[in-house]
Image (spheres, rainbow, N blue to C red):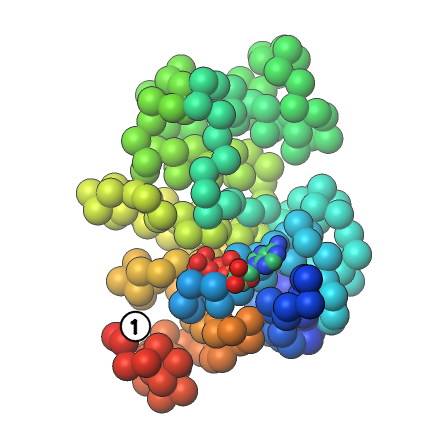
């Protein structure tokens, strides 16, 4: 079986600086691969390359055996690749349900036209809000949500497009300690119960240990290690890269 995603010598340079360098790895269907690494290591840049937000300077990206290196963000999304962002991408004055409805319209190839009729999307929106635990917040504006609810809404916006491969960039960022377990359980369920392939950047190892099949360590734009969590944590090169800090 071909891997879902295959990166080969992927690189990105901007303004004379090399941000991502010679990154190669493959991800199998249904796998959960987590990315760790110090600030500025290139994790978000790598996600930008995979999702098509920035063009690759070198190397290639294959999805289901097709070379998508030159494809646009929407073309990749149509193939089932979706992502969330490290910083919140919500409209504070728009309701939870409208966020998901507009994302559904966009996923159907429509535009983000706010005046389009809501009814055809009601069932789909309802299902996604139920799935993400936001059904009772459907009429609330995004600005009134807790940080954890905002992260769930970002997942709902992603899920309504039915991605098979989800890139989650620090989905716990800004979330209170009390809200982390529910969000972790939701992400685990999207992976284990629905079989979605997940790539996730996360700084908190305690969150990742119950989720990730493999850990990828980024350092200065390169892939320093890629292995099971236990093997990565025992890797002396990784330990040195973190200057003795506990992972
Ligand atoms: N558009 C850009 N132009 C110039 N430099 C950039 C650009 N985007 C990112 N960088 C630089 O590339 C490096 C990697 O950034 P990136 O955000 O990918 O790291 P990261 O591992 O995701 O960090 P963090 O954990 O802080 O989110 C940083 O030094 C950053 O300043």
Residue 247, above or below 185: below
Q: Residue at x 70, y 25 (%)?
A: 111
Residue 125 falls left or right of residue 192: right
- Mark 1, other Cα within 10 Å: few <14 / some 14–19 / many ≥20: some
Q: Residue at x 45, y 38 (%)?
A: 88
Question: Furthest residue to the front?
Answer: 15
Q: Quadrant of residue 56?
A: bottom right
Q: Quadrant of residue 49?
A: bottom right
Disc 1: which residue? 247
- Front residue (pair 245, 216): 245
Q: Residue at x 35, y 48 (%)?
A: 172
Asked if one can make out residue 188 in the rendered structure from this viewpoint, the answer is yes
**x, y percentage for residue 71?**
77, 52
SS label for mark 1: loop
**x, y percentage for residue 210?**
31, 62
Residue 77, above or below 47: above
Q: Quadrant of the C terminus?
A: bottom left
Asked if one can make out residue 138 in the rendered structure from this viewpoint, the answer is no
Residue 102 falls left or right of residue 234: right
Question: Furthest residue to the left?
Answer: 178
**Count of numbered marks:** 1
**x, y percentage for residue 100?**
52, 27
Residue 244, above or below 101: below
Is label 1 within 8 A of ligand 1 (CB to nearest ligand atom)?
no
Residue 245 falls left or right of residue 90: left
**x, y percentage for residue 244?**
28, 81
Q: Residue at x 58, y 13 (%)?
A: 118
Q: Quadrant of the N terminus?
A: bottom right
């Amino acid at each position: 079986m071909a891997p879902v995603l295959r990166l080969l010598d992927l690189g990105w340079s901007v303004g004379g600086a090399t941000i991502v360098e010679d990154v190669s790895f493959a991800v199998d269907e249904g796998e959960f691969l987590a990315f760790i690494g110090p600030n500025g290591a290139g994790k978000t840049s790598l996600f930008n390359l995979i999702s098509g937000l920035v063009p690759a300077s070198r190397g290639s990206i294959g999805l289901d055996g097709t070379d998508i290196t030159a494809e646009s963000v929407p073309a990749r999304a149509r193939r089932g690749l979706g992502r969330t962002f490290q910083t919140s991408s919500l409209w504070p004055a728009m309701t939870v349900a409208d966020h998901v409805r507009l994302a559904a319209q966009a996923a159907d190839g429509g535009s983000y036209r706010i005046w389009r009729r809501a009814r055809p999307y009601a069932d789909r929106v309802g299902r996604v809000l139920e799935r993400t635990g936001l059904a009772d917040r459907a009429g609330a504006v995004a600005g009134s949500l807790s940080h954890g609810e905002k992260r769930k809404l970002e997942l709902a916006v992603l899920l309504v497009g039915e991605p098979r491969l989800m890139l989650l960039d620090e989905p716990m960022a800004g979330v209170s300690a009390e809200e982390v377990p529910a969000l972790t359980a939701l992400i685990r369920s999207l992976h284990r119960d629905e079989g979605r392939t997940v790539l996730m950047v996360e700084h908190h190892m305690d969150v990742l240990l119950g989720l990730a099949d493999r850990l990828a360590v980024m350092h200065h734009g390169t892939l320093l290690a890629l292995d099971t969590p236990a093997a990565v944590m025992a890797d002396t090169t990784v330990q040195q890269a973190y200057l003795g800090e506990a992972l």
